[in-house]
Amino acid sequence: MRRNTAQIDLFGEATDKPSLPTNYRPLRPAHFDVFRIYLASGSLATPERRRFVRGICSLYPEAKVVECLDTPHNRIQLDGADALELHKLGKHTLVLGELKVAVRFSQEKGNACPNYWHFSPSGFCPYGCKYCYLAGTQGVKFSPTVKVYVNLPEILWEIDRISGSLGRPTAFYLGKLQDGLALDPLTAYSTVMVPFFAHHSLVRLTLLTKSAHVERLLELEHRGHTILSWSVNPPEVAAIFEENVPNMTERLEAMKLVAAKGYPVRAVMMPIVPIEGWEDLYLAFTECLLKTVPIQRLTLGGVCIYSGARRLMEQKIGPYNAISSNIDGNLNKAGDGRERYSEALRHRAYSIIVEAARRLSPDVELALCLEDKALWQRTGLGSHVGRCNCVL
């Protein structure tokens, strides 16, 4: 039977639904310098939201605050002359608003993705990964700002409603359209979400991040219902393609800290980038990862990039980079519209890492991301199809 979360005392008193975080001190997240804040539609709609928004704005007295309460969060127009300038401005622009349809079911086609429920208490992120696939999506292309949605209680209540109709343990994924943890010092959303999932009999949280901001997580009761995943790559790859991002040492330390507190921990090695000497680099990094952190599941993936995101990447680092140079222009993009490496390169990369992982940590679960079943089978993972990062 589904537990009635309306009876859960998450915040010191019985409540009909979760609230925005209270009694916390917002902190500036690392890697996020805010030049301008927009208060979009819904941001000041209730006293609770106004209190929350005021706390965040007070952190940035140097930022210009613009009230545009009749404008939706995804219609904030910046002054950039082209896509690259818009992208750069957006990384320093914070939008506070509401997202009314924040819980969705993915509809991937043309690959073996099992599809899954995902939700968005925030949108986009401040990090500067050159290969960012979100940069090619329609919503980010028009308004590439960092967004915090202040209707978190309603989002969680919608998750509860959906879980009741499903009637079985289900993962809800945070990280498809944002970094799941990068803004947590600012919002303290983890202090609401983790207890919500911990006390719920059916829903589980799977979260993907590059952040090292795990301080709030360490003191929370999670009951194993929050699964934390980190996006990782060899430091040599990160140095080229991941700008303004916590380094790999910081990420590995964060993973160790939460694992010590009993959180299930996963890693996503994606996109694998074939820079010079990549085989040895990925073998060495796989060994470092598995010896440093008790990973339960490791998911591998190549580049899966939309044409708009590729153009933006090439504006930043030029067209002759290790990603663009290895994309197979002959592949049919009709399935999901993304560009990829050749199947031969993907198979070689996955096989090298899978073999090393099985030797180093025989119990670790292995999976592929956004790949077809034939490649799963060729890589020896045919029996694992559907058990990848975003699902239970």
Image (spheres, rainbow, N blue to C red):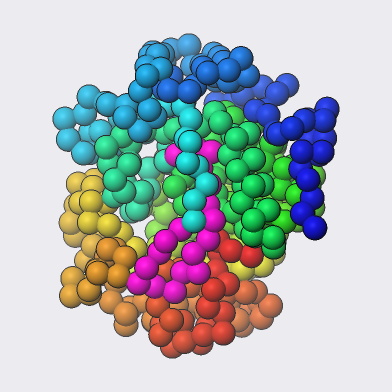
Q: Determine which quarter of the picture holds residue 252.
A: bottom right
Q: Does the stretch in magenta take in 170?
A: no
- Which residue appears at 48% of the width and 72% of the height? 368
Residue 311, x across and y down, in percent: 20, 51
What kind of secondary structure does the magenta stretch mostly adopt? loop
* Quadrant in which the N terminus appears: bottom right
Q: In this view, does 7 lie to the left or right of 33?
A: right
Q: Give the range drawn in magenta.
A: 106-123
Q: In which quarter of the image is residue 13?
A: top right
Q: Quadrant of residue 155?
A: top right
Query: Is the residue 111 above or below the residue 240 in the image?
Result: below
Residue lying at 69% horizontally and 78% vertically, measured from the top left: 363
Horizontal arrangement in the rendering, residue 13 relative to residue 385 (left or right) = right
Q: Which residue appears at 50% of the width and 42% of the height?
A: 102
State the image coordinates of residue 358 (x, y, percent, origin top left): 60, 81
- Provide residue 99's location: percent of width, then percent of height: 47, 35
